[in-house]
Amino acid sequence: MEINSILPVIPIVAAGLAAIGIWINGDKAFWRNLWSTVASVVAFLAVISMVPAALDHKIHVANILNMGGLTLTLRVDDLGLVFGMVSSSMWLLVNIYAIGYMEHEHAKQRFFAFFALSMFSAFGIAFAENLFAFFIFYEMLSLCTYPLVVHEETEEAMKAGTKYLIYTLGGGGCLLIAIIITYFVTGNISLDSAGIFSISDGTGLLRALFFLYLIGFGVKAGIMPMHQWLPSAMVAPTPVSTLLHAVAVVKAGAFGILRLVYNIYGVDLMAKLDLGTVLAFIASFTIVTASIIALRQDNLKRRLAYSTIGQLSYIVLGAALLAPAAAIGAMVHIANHAFTKGTLFMCAGIIAEETGVKNISQLNGMGRRLPLTMTAFTIGAFGMIGMPPLAGFMTKWYLGVGAGQSHQPIFIMVLVTSSILNAIYFLPIIYRAFFAKTTEQEDKVLKRPKDRLRIETVWMMLVPIMATTAVSLVLGIFTTAPGLPMSIAKLATAFLVGGK
């Protein structure tokens, strides 16, 4: 049942007003931090307030404007609500982290203004009722995150930003063409049903159009070989890396692929055209190849970047298997990856800020210098590997069950292979931090300054990683059991059985 509500508008307006407020008087730290913090809290509360109605099979809808039959409408179904919950909760935490991290950085006013605009776009993507609205917010996200990618203003940063724009705007062009063709073929671009197309629209056209959509969404989702922009973007400050990988950009791409499978084509049509199997093999190739490349990366953020490329394709694989359990795994992984990978990137930022160390080969003994940070990193790494009872294990369990439901056990082997590779590139980091012997030079780097009256780092950077780590610990139990309140699995089940 749909209910007219202002709630879907509030997170978007809060982010937009924060960006305006920061742009006007954000040169003063008090007002800049106030605007961004209040907006993130308001957005979080507005999104969470929609959960009880969603669990009662009610969908919040808000009509914004109508332009010649093309409407800008917000509609919060269960899938959009999951993305909205993840985005709002991570914005709240990453904002606190960014305030501490950016304390000694330049251009803070610009940074926080575009950070808020990025969240404005992310909420729009999550709640877009049709492809027209989706596209507007999707392209805004590309433009709003560009100043964040090039924030350092170095030659390397500018090259990374140029590559980022070429890839994302190129993908956006493919998406626009696909949407226009969809409108002319069907006269319908709404995302409120289990499929816009029918087999009568022509199998050749539908297959070609599917790959056009896949390019449009796959660029941001980091599907290989459209992933090249993502490791390069690691030149940006750590809060940006966290935003790109855990909250907005890459999740927007993966979310778009879920919309493609469940709302644009629909499970039945995907099966008739054999597109699910094709997509599953593309996802599997990305999962395994990105993990192999991650093994060769000494720079910590680049290893995490390639890990993200592989982990995002778990979401794609979950959609591609066209099985109920796999779909639940995909939706759970939106949250799991956000909190877990967000933890890892923020830990990498603390390591770099406090010790200047950016490479894995220099992490020997880091657990003595930053015990809380490296403990959080260890828990996050275990989550990525898929160790029980963390949510990463639940993701792979659901995906494995889904592979069984779809009678494609080969993809269980992909998950096993991926977990082994995850362990191979994460466990050496943990070993170095806690067990490796250190040299005299390394001991000098690890020595804590005597004049510090703080624990490891400023509290604004430490508290968010403790929070995301805690969520990672309980997510496997609290949000995956369908019988529990506020359960992502419960929302996923409702989405699959008709709560779209």
Image (cartoon, rainbow, N blue to C red):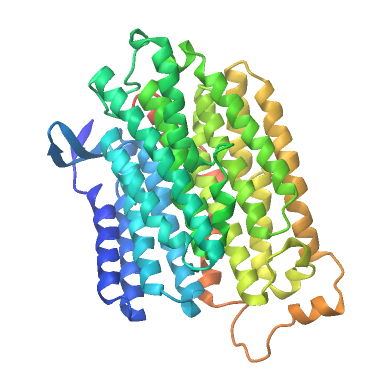
Of residues 153 and 415, the one nearer the viewer is 153
Of residues 483 and 325, the one nearer the viewer is 325
Confirm whether residue 314 shows in the render: yes
Which residue corresponds to the image point at 46% horizontal and 66% vertical from the top-left?
Answer: 151
Residue 141 x %, y %: 37, 50
Residue 441 x %, y %: 82, 79
In-image side of 466 versus 413 (left or right): left
Of residues 283 and 170, the one nearer the viewer is 170
In this view, the residue farthest toward the bottom is 451
Q: Residue 46, relative to residue 110: is it above or below?
A: above
Which residue corresponds to the image point at 41% horizontal and 56% vertical from the top-left?
Answer: 145
Residue 423 x %, y %: 75, 46
Residue 101 x %, y %: 51, 72
Of residues 125 and 223, the one nearer the viewer is 223
In-image side of 162 versus 132 (left or right): right
Which residue corresponds to the image point at 80% horizontal and 59% vertical from the top-left?
Answer: 431
Q: Residue 374, relative to residue 75: is it above or below?
A: below
Confirm whether residue 473 shows in the render: no
Quarter holding the C terminus?
Answer: top left
Q: How many marks?
A: 0
Quarter holding the N terminus?
Answer: top left
In this view, the residue farthest toward the top is 200
